[in-house]
Image (cartoon, grey):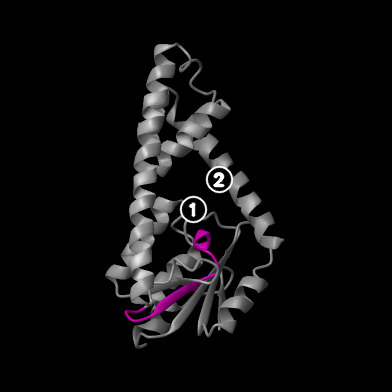
């Protein structure tokens, strides 16, 4: 059974009386004109009993319609199967949080193209724990280095100016701060620009990243 963002999910009713232990697939394409058929075929080939598909949705949005339907449908004992982890999360931090939330519900996750992401086995769970530790360390390091660099740049008079102008350097810094868990308000304060400027710049950066990911996936 294939559920797409253009169809009623009916996930709560379908999953209410269902016993866990199934393989459930999730696929996503960044642009509406992209075809998720290849992802769907891969997920069906490994035995997914149902595949939820989002069209034209950014991986950085957690309110994607079919992603929410998928979360509603999943039960303890199920295994969520994806082609790549970036189908469900746009940053390492988001991915780790999502996997931990699924784990708390008794749900495993398996990536078809990333051997390290497979919590159905003891070794897979151990590898994910190591990956999570290093990812968090990388996030903390990026945040500290970014804040240190911004402080130095501000001391040199290179940060500031019109609040509506986001230079490429500020966009990179904003993305790094967001990856470290910074809110829009916090990022705007650190960069010395307006919150709306940060939001617009990050939205455009997300669209560019999703477009590049879509082109890579299509190839």
Q: Tell me the distance, in whole angstroms, between the alpha carbons under discs 1 and 2.
A: 9 Å
Q: Which residues are magenta?
A: 75-87
**Residue that carries the numbered disc 1 in the rendered image:** 90
Quadrant housing residue 99:
bottom left
Q: Secondary structure at mark 2?
A: helix
Q: In front here: 7 or 51?
A: 51
- Disc number at residue 78? none
Q: Assess whether mark 2 and mark 1 are in contact (beta carbons under 8 angstroms).
A: yes
Q: Position of residue 191 (x, y in %)?
A: 42, 25
In-image side of 132 versus 9 (left or right): left
Which quadrant is home to the N terminus? Answer: bottom right
Counting other residues with Cα less than 10 Å from the Cα at mark 1, is it few (<14), some (14-19), or many (20 or more)?
some
**Residue that carries the numbered disc 2 in the rendered image:** 206
Q: Position of residue 205 (x, y in %)?
A: 57, 41
Q: Residue at x 31, y 69 (%)?
A: 103
Q: Residue at x 44, y 58 (%)?
A: 63
Q: Is residue 85 magenta?
A: yes
Q: Residue at x 38, y 43 (%)?
A: 139
Q: Is residue 88 magenta?
A: no
Q: Does residue 100 lie above or below 8 as drawn?
A: above
Q: In front here: 192 or 92?
A: 92
Q: Position of residue 47 (x, y in %)?
A: 53, 85
């Amino acid at each position: 059974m294939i559920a797409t963002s253009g169809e009623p999910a009916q996930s709560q009713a379908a999953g209410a009386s269902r016993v866990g232990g199934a393989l459930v697939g999730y696929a996503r394409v960044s642009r509406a004109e992209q075809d998720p058929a290849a992802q769907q075929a891969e997920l069906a080939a490994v035995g997914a009993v149902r595949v939820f598909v989002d069209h034209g949705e950014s991986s950085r949005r957690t309110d994607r319609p079919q992603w929410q339907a998928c979360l509603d449908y999943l039960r303890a004992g199920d295994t969520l199967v994806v082609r790549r982890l970036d189908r469900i999360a746009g940053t390492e931090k988001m991915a780790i949080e999502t996997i931990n939330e699924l784990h708390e519900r008794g749900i495993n996750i398996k990536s078809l193209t990333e051997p390290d992401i497979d919590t159905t086995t003891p070794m897979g769970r151990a590898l994910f724990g190591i990956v999570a530790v290093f990812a968090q360390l990388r996030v903390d390091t990026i945040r500290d280095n970014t804040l240190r660099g911004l402080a130095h740049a501000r001391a040199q008079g290179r940060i500031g100016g019109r609040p509506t102008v986001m230079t490429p350097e500020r966009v990179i810094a904003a993305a790094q701060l967001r990856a470290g868990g910074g809110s829009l308000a916090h990022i705007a304060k650190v960069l010395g620009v307006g919150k709306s400027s940060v939001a617009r710049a990050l939205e455009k950066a997300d669209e560019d990243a999703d477009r590049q990911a879509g082109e890579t996936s299509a190839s």
